[in-house]
Image (cartoon, rainbow, N blue to C red):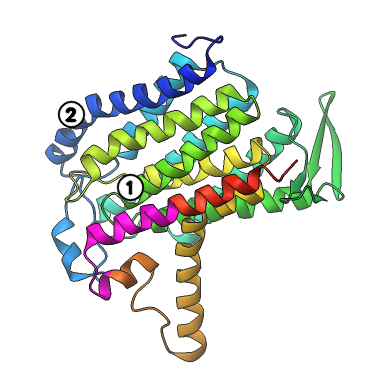
Amino acid sequence: MLGDARYPTYTVFLAVGIAALIVIILMPAFIRLMRKDGVGQQVRADGPQSHLVKQGTPTMGGVIILISLLLTCVLLARWTPDLICCIVVTFATALLGLLDDIESVSHGRSLGLTPLQKMAGLTVLSVGFCLVAVNVCGVAPTITFPGGFVIDLGVLTTTLDVGGVTVSIPWIYAFFVFLLMTGLSNAVNLTDGLDGLAGGTVLVVMLFMAMVAYRYDEINLAVFAAATAGACVGFLWFNSYPASIFMGDTGSLALGSAFAALAVLTKTEVTSLVMGGLFVVEALSVLIQVASFKLTGKRVFLMAPLHHHFEKKGWSETKVVIRFWIVSAAFAAIGFALFFQLT
């Protein structure tokens, strides 16, 4: 380990730098490989016309983000059950996203796996993560609100004896974790529509999650969050407008899943939704748009997700991205302030 247990702050900051450096070193070769093999982004035909020039830009950059995250954790973190749980669910979700990206590229369309296939995969992963978190990592099946108000979601729990090992299945909490993980994974995926948007907003949120984990003395989870932020820093070097590569579903689904996993393992499920408020707003804009069109035949936004609405209003892509970064930082700061009201 390169980190020093005597100086946890140093270790966490080092994680940001190492993760960023790994991405910056590995990404150019990955971009060349993707271009050589013709692995490019498929742009939705009904999207903004200015995005058509992005067609064919190398994608699946999330692979390098995940490699950087893993290597940084190997170098700096101790492999506790919490960290292993976080790593496994993040990489499993990345694999689901990778399959989606491969399907999209191979068929030359902007859609990959069907919504049902994605949901089935995310369901299995989120429920499996919940059971491991509760039974192995000792996570309580409760949610805590600012002010210390706690709701026990373990009131409906089935206890099984599996090979001499007691396994608890908190049904209501498992459903809640399913909503949280699938919701955030898809929300980050929806946010990934402009150059630098998802990478920058995830960077901001993960820095705050690193501080949350550090505040709870969960240094290994703090390293995980800091390494994710650092990987996003390195990725933004290549993903800033005009992007040389996109993260693809491989990156966006995995980053959303990592965020949800950290929220569960640090017991900040409620405040995490405030910290990631921009992702929530982006997802809600799509739900509102679809519901409004089906019920009334009218659209609320010029285009959904919300970042495309502002593009349609005439904002430049870089203006939308930078302003959304600012909004994301504001949400994260408010959520972090509320975090101190949990106890």
Q: Nearer the viewer, residue 113 or 252?
A: 252
Q: Is residue 338 visible from the viewing direction of this image?
A: yes
- Which quadrant, please, contains the C terminus? top right
Between 257 and 302, the one nearer to me in the picture? 302
Task: Say which element carries label 1.
Answer: helix
Find residue 341 and report its horizontal and vertical position in percent.
Answer: 70, 46
Residue 196 lies in the magenta stretch: no
Write the residue at 44% across / 14% down: 75
Please tell me whether the stretch drawn in magenta is mainly helix, strand or loop: helix
Residue 283 horizontal/vertical position (percent): 48, 63
**Which residue position is annotated with label 1?**
248
Specify the quadrant of the image occupied by residue 29.
Answer: top left
The amino acid at mark 1 is Gly
Q: Is residue 306 left or right of residue 140?
A: left
Q: Magenta segment: does it hold 319?
A: yes
State the residue in front, 304 or 36: 304
Callout 2 secondary element: helix
Residue 337 coordinates in the image, percent (x, y) = 60, 46
Magenta segment, which residues? 311-328
Mark 2 vs mark 1, CA separation in Å? 17 Å
> On the rendered structure, is 85 left or right of 301?
right
Q: Residue at x 64, y 44 (%)?
A: 339
Farthest-out residue, bottom: 296
Q: Amino acid at mark 2?
A: Ala
Say which residue label 2 marks. 29
